[in-house]
Amino acid sequence: MKKILVTIVALLASIALSAQECSTTWPYLYPQFTQGVVHLTGGSKLQHPLNVHVQKGRLHYVENGLVKEAMNRDIFFIQIGEERYNVVNGDVMKVVATTEGGFVAAHYYADMDKLRETGGAYGSSSTTQATRLLTSIDMVGANTNHMEMWQNRNSGESISLICKYYLVTGKDVYPASKKGVETFLPESRLGEFKAFLKENKIKWKDPQSLIKVVEFLKQ
């Protein structure tokens, strides 16, 4: 029953994020900055309204009315509401499944290729329009007035999100795919991994299935 509930919660969270309207004027994972806690590597904590920038992969927070950017190297982990985030490969990623000694991370980021393919508007060329959109998403975020950004959040162009999973064991990070694991796995374990895959029907887009691969990797 507990496993079923965890799966349902993960599914609902995934649906909520996929429905989230990100735009070039609001390039964030959450529809608003949400109160959370940043646990720093030195042991101290910071409490601020938090959000994750979907192009930069950085944690942004609101302080004294301004949106600021946290330094990823100083972050131990982040708690936003009931959800936990870690810095993986230099980006802030959501922890979507855990086991002792490892976890599955979901990297939600802006589909920049889709932005570049956007057609021209008001007679502008496709290239000109795409350049304007890319410039816009780079401009909003850190050192911006939070209230102004909030008021303009619906004026930008829509951004599609991509979700890519990673398997994390200690300091080792593996792309969540058969080829990704094989690329980083020692040659001495390739046969063992092949036998593991034959015994376990891994669903590479399902965090609860991927956690089995994490448990294999940390052996």
Image (cartoon, rainbow, N blue to C red):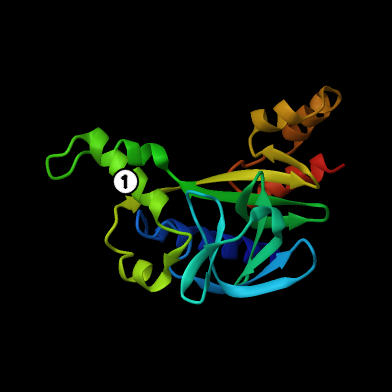
In front here: 113 or 191? Answer: 113
Point out residue 157 in the picture as x, y percentages from the top left corner: 29, 52
Point out residue 94 in the picture as x, y percentages from the top left corner: 61, 56
Q: Residue at x 40, y 57 (%)?
A: 140
Q: Residue at x 32, y 71 (%)?
A: 151
When the figure is inspected, residue 59 is found, relative to residue 32, above or below; the finding is above
Question: How many numbered markers are drawn?
Answer: 1
In front here: 154 or 105? Answer: 154
Q: Quadrant of the C terminus?
A: top right
Q: Residue at x 62, y 71 (%)?
A: 82
When the figure is inspected, residue 56 is found, relative to residue 1, above or below; the finding is above
Q: Secondary structure at mark 1?
A: helix
In front here: 215 or 195? Answer: 215
Choose top left, top right, bottom left or bottom right for residue 126: top left
The answer to whether residue 118 is visible is no
Give left or right: position of 11 versus 28. right
Q: Quadrant of the N terminus?
A: bottom right
**Residue corresponding to mark 1:** 133
Of the residues shown, which amino acid type is indicated by label 1? Answer: Leu
Point out residue 199 in the picture as x, y percentages from the top left corner: 76, 36
Rate crowding at label 1 as few (under 14), some (14 to 19) or many (20 or more) other CA atoms within 10 Å: many
The answer to whether residue 139 is visible is yes
Point out residue 114 in the picture as x, y percentages from the top left corner: 36, 39
When the figure is inspected, residue 82 is found, relative to residue 77, above or below; the finding is below
Choose top left, top right, bottom left or bottom right for residue 89: top right
Q: Residue at x 16, y 39 (%)?
A: 124
Give left or right: position of 128 versus 163. left
Give left or right: position of 26 versus 126. right
Give left or right: position of 80 versus 134. right
